[in-house]
Structure formats: structure tokens, C-alpha cells
Amino acid sequence: MFFHILLWNLYPDADPTDVALGMRRMQRENPAEMKRLTFGRRAEVVSAGPLPFGELRRGRDGLERAGDGFEYFFLMDFEDNPAYRRYVDSDAHMDFVWESCAARWSEFMSTNHQHEEGQPLAASTRGGSGSVLDLVLWDVERDAQEREVAEMIAAAAALASELPEVGAVICGRGFLPDPGSGQKTVDRSLLRPRQEPRSYHLVGESPRFGIALEFADAAAFDSYSASDGGPRSSSASHRSGRAWHLPMAVEWG
């Protein structure tokens, strides 16, 4: 099983409503392939735990904030990689990319992950609109042992049963290499609808691990963040050189 996270920022003159309408259409046109589509933007919550919000890089005292990260997100569930590829190659996806994204996104990061722990293929978040997804994407040092990685993922997945504020967890490591994966900047001067060359430049590789923690609302997230749960969930701080920590308010899904 497979989950896909895409994060982006818009050009200042773009209307985020246009993108939201495109994503809803995309889900309607791909009901057999896409099991879930959840999207929204950065939640207005305060960081009370050890892991700052935004784009993070390793510093003297662990992971430190290096930038804002991304403002918008969507998360998709698929049964497997072939289902994801059918979705990517569909007319609905191409229409979404060119009509809703290409001329509006200033930068984005696409990541694909295989479900290893947690609760995959949920039809929607339990709280729906107004719930919060805490997204953490990260790498670990190259000499990390497989045992360490497995323990890290298992500890993250266990949060749903250990902490009452956490409604659900999905967690896994980067899946098959995909030409759409990675961090990119968009160049409007290259935009040629539905034709090559694509209108973006690759500026960074996709992080190797991803987790999404689900909360019923901002109050539940605040309670979790201020508790001992925050430190235990900070998988990104485990021998990591870079990470993104982005709590997102769900608008739909």
C-alpha cells in the first residue's frame, strides 16, 4: 500500500480556491485508483514540543529551523504503485496539473511512501474539515542500521495507541524512484500546457521517510504538542540531517 504527499507554495497572484476545485474534480474522476484525497493549508497552531515547525536542518543542538517550509498540502492513499501510476497517467491528473497547478505554484515537493505501519487507506480523516494532520518528512544518516530505522517507524506508529489525542497514524519510507518526486521550483517562462519541457527545476531529493499524525482539531494537537508525546513522536530528530515539520489544517477530506 502506498501514500503520496505533495506540498506547495503559491505565487502571490494565485487563487488557492482554483487549486482546491481542481483537486476535488481529480478525485471524482479517479474513484477506482485514489482511495483518499485530503488537502488543506498550514494550521494556526503554536509549537510547544522539541521539533520546530517548517524546514529543518541539523545544527549544533539538533534540528533547527531553516525556513518556513510549505503552506499547502494534499495526501493521497493508493492500493499499490500500479494504481498510483494509472492515476498519474490519467487525463484527470494531467488536467489538474496544467489547469490548477503549473501556472500557480511557485515551488513544491512531491514524496511517495510505502505504508509500513499505521492505518492505511482511510477513506477520510475522522474529524473531516477542521481536523489537523501533523506531517513530518525526514532523512536519517546513511550509516543508520536497519534495526534503528525499524524501531523508529514502529515507535511513531505506536503513538495512536499510546496517546489519546492521536486519532490515526500512517508512516513509511520512500517508495520506488519516481520522476515526479523531489523538491522543485517552478519557472512560468517554461510553461507549455501539457507539453515538455516541464515548467520546474529539481532543487532537492525527496526525503526518505514520512509520517502523518491525525488530530480531531487544533485543541487536540495543542494538547499533544505540550505533552510528553511531542518528544516521543519526533522521529525526524533521530540521526537526521534535514526534515520538514508541517502541521496542516484539513479543508477537505
Image: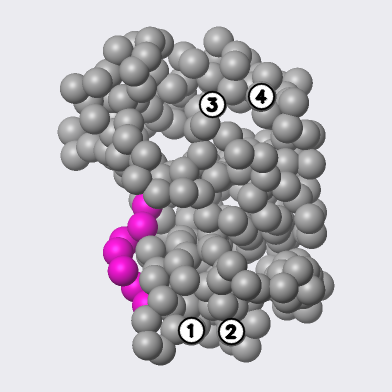
Residue 20 percent across, percent down from the top left: 44, 31
Residue 225 in the figure: left or right of residue 28: left
Mark 3 touches mark 1? (CB < 8 Å): no
Instruction: Report helix, strand or loop for mark 4.
Output: helix
Quarter occupied by the N terminus = top right
Report the Cα–Cα distance between label 3 and label 2.
Answer: 35 Å
Mark 2 vs 1, N-terminal side: 1
Residue 64 position (above or below residue 199): below
Mark 3 vs 4, N-terminal side: 3
Mark 3 vs 2, N-terminal side: 3
Residue 121 percent across, percent down from the top left: 77, 42
Which numbered dot is residue 85?
4
Report the Cα–Cα distance between label 2 and label 1.
Answer: 6 Å
Mark 4 vs 2, N-terminal side: 4
Q: From which residue to which does the magenta span run?
A: 64-70
Q: Nearer the viewer, residue 241 or 90?
A: 241
The residue that disc 2 covers is 231
* Residue at (48% x, 84% y) in the render: 50
The residue that disc 3 covers is 24
Mark 3 touches mark 4? (CB < 8 Å): no
Mark 1 or 4: in front is: 4
Q: Estimate how packed mark 1 is, as few (under 14), some (14 to 19) or many (20 or more) residues with alpha carbons within 10 Å.
A: some
Residue 246 percent across, percent down from the top left: 46, 61
Q: Estimate how packed mark 2 is, as few (under 14), some (14 to 19) or many (20 or more) residues with alpha carbons within 10 Å.
A: some
Mark 2 touches mark 1? (CB < 8 Å): yes
Mark 4 touches mark 2? (CB < 8 Å): no
Residue 162 position (above or below residue 206): below
Which numbered dot is residue 50?
1
The three-letter code of the residue at mark 2 reads Pro
